[in-house]
Image: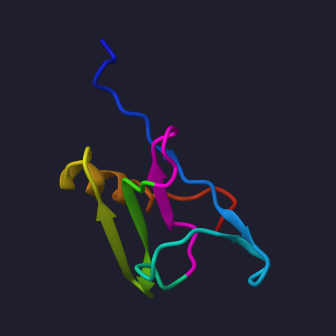
Amino acid sequence: DMTNVIELVNKPPRWNDHVGAYVLNFSGRVTMASVKNFQLVTPEDEDSVILQFGRVGKDLFTADLAWPLSPLQAFAICLSSFDSKLACE
């Protein structure tokens, strides 16, 4: 029974001519570029961020979450981003 399953996907970045790169808007909550930065959304509503995670210092990160994720689920997802990113670092 998959009626209570919610699919989350990475929010696709948008091209920014000023920066000359693809970017995500973290509303000032993430202050450093990193391959570990991400935002999760539902495919039906890419404007409502369910979880965002990103670097704010050399060894410091921040996470913001919303329903339907619990803090434990969000922590587990964020922790998984510390696994090696192939061809990114």
The correct choice, above or below, for 42 with respect to 62 in the image is above
Residue 5 in which image quadrant: top left
Q: Is the image coloured rainbow, by chain, by secondary structure, or in one colour? A: rainbow
Residue 40 painted magenta = yes
Vertical arrangement, residue 29 with respect to residue 14, above or below: below
Q: Residue at x 42, y 54 (%)?
A: 48
Total number of numbered discs in the rendering: 0
Residue 37 at x, y = what percent? 50, 67
Queried whether the magenta region covers residue 69, the answer comes back as: no
Residue 14: x percent and y percent? 68, 63
> Relative to residue 6, is residue 44 drawn left or right?
right
Query: For the C terminus, which image quadrant?
Result: bottom right
The image position of residue 71, as x and y in percent, is 20, 55
Find residue 3 and report its horizontal and vertical position in percent.
31, 18
Which quadrant would the N terminus be assigned to in this image? top left
**Looking at this view, is 65 or 45 the one in front?**
45
Task: Using the image, determine if residue 59 lies above or below residue 89.
Answer: below
- Main SS, magenta residues: loop
| Residues rendered magenta in the picture | 33-47
Q: Could you tell me which residue is drawn at 36 percent across and 33 percent down?
A: 6
| Residue depicted at x 39% and y 83% | 59
39 and 59: which is toward the camera: 39
Q: Is residue 81 left or right of residue 33?
A: left
Indicate the quadrant where residue 86 lies. Answer: bottom right
Q: Residue at position x 49%, y 55% from top?
A: 47
Residue most toward the top? 1
Foreground residue among 86 and 76: 76
